[in-house]
Image: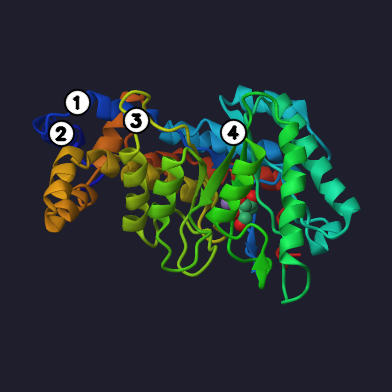
Amino acid sequence: MAGYNDRTLEQQAQRILNDVADQGRNPKALMERLASLRIEIPSWGFADTGTRFGKFLQPAAARTTEEKLEDAAEVHRRTGICPSVAIHVLWDFPAGWDPQVAHRAHELGMKIGSINPNLFQDQCYKYGSLANPDPKIRAVAVQHCLNSIELAKEAGSGLLSLWLADGTNYPGQDSIRDRKRRVGECLKQIYAALPDGMTMLVEYKPFEPAFYHTDIADWGMAYIFAREVGPQAKVLVDFGHHLPGQNIEQIVAWLLDEGMLGGFHFNDHKYADDDLTFSSIDPYAAFRVFHEIVSADDPDHGPADIAYMIDQSHNLKPKIAAMIQTVTMIHELFAKALLVDRQNLAEAQTRGDIVAAETALRDAFFTDTRPLVGAARIQMGLAPDALAAHEASGYTQRAAQERAARHGISKGGSYA
Ligand code: PSV
Ligand code: MN
């Protein structure tokens, strides 16, 4: 069978690398860049989640933060490029920071990654958090972010990742401009508490849960807020947070050029913020984003410092398998972007040869990069087929049994 289980995988990888060498490029550097990619996995990708209509429970789903870390460690064990876990403060630490969790993460060979404050689930946030008309509620929200910065310091994390659900549902519900100023003011207070070396990421989303206007609805708004507060703030682009037809790679290119792209949330979508596994719908769109990222590599300073994070929530696929699938897709598409013959592309662009320029992208996109990813995994001492290795390990079956014994059988029910 072709793909990761092909016995000639390493020879196929060599053939691709020979072509790279023929283009006058360094195949070793390409393999090093491929192996050095790091992707953060979200703790919330391993718990039972659903839609607003209901949850379908999985016997192996993680029910404690420790179990989420164990599942994340299984993804890293198979893929070799996912050593950190994003934390959602109230979902993972409902009773406050627990140093035991960081200890357990280290035991598992994992680090705590970005810290995501939760500014949307408490009753007080009915009319918003940082944009709320009531200064007392804004103070509660700011305090939660300050506590999250403390938590980040204790966990050894350098990223505070902010997403606001704030917005309004009806025209006239509140003043859009007043809300903008309230958010800006609160962000300044939060920014002032950042220690050196910690980055604040500002994420945007066009709608949901608010359906008339969202306070940080697009990259321009996130950019303005980030720029206003200071150099440690950057924009976070979530692939699923764009209206249909939006040219996401252009946003990425602009933010990179402005030095303002701080992070990326990988998932895929067909209609809205569907949180599907990455590239399940449109791999070419995802490839074009990676192409812009690799194009922006600085010849003197190397790649831009971007936090690559997954933000998906698959309620039907088995969770660890879905995560490995996403990591593998990211790795394969990143490899395709590395294969673009940029010299050839630049020459075609200069000549105004549109067909040749587009062909330079398509040649790379249609190259099967599984041999390169498989070879990178072999170099890391891993099995080339991460998904098959995970499935053969029996991890999910064991987790289902142990977790049922520990917590009892999960009960079905609505999302509430
Ligand atoms: C909001 O839809 C979002 O993309 C934010 O990043 C949240 O932190 C995350 O999803 C929660 O699943
Ligand atoms: Mn997100």
Comparing marks 3 and 2, which lies closer to the viewer? 3
Q: Position of residue 157 (x, y in %)?
A: 64, 29
Q: Is residue 386 above or below residue 251?
A: above
Mark 3 or 2, nearer chain start: 2
Comparing marks 4 and 2, which lies closer to the viewer? 4
Q: Is residue 362 above or below residue 387?
A: below
Comparing marks 1 and 4, which lies closer to the viewer? 4
Query: Mark 4 = which residue?
Result: 231
Kindly identify which numbered label has been placed on residue 13. none
Query: Mark 3 = which residue?
Result: 298
Mark 3 or 4, nearer chain start: 4
Alpha carbon separation for disc pair 2 and 1: 7 Å
Alpha carbon separation for disc pair 1 and 4: 34 Å
**Three-letter amino acid code at disc 2?**
Val
Q: Is residue 97 above or below residue 132?
A: above
Q: Residues within 10 Å of mark 1 (few under 14, many from 20)?
A: few
Query: Mark 2 = which residue?
Result: 20
Alpha carbon separation for disc pair 3 and 1: 16 Å
Query: Mark 1 = which residue?
Result: 26
Mark 3 or 1, nearer chain start: 1
Quadrant of the rendering where the C terminus is positioned: bottom right
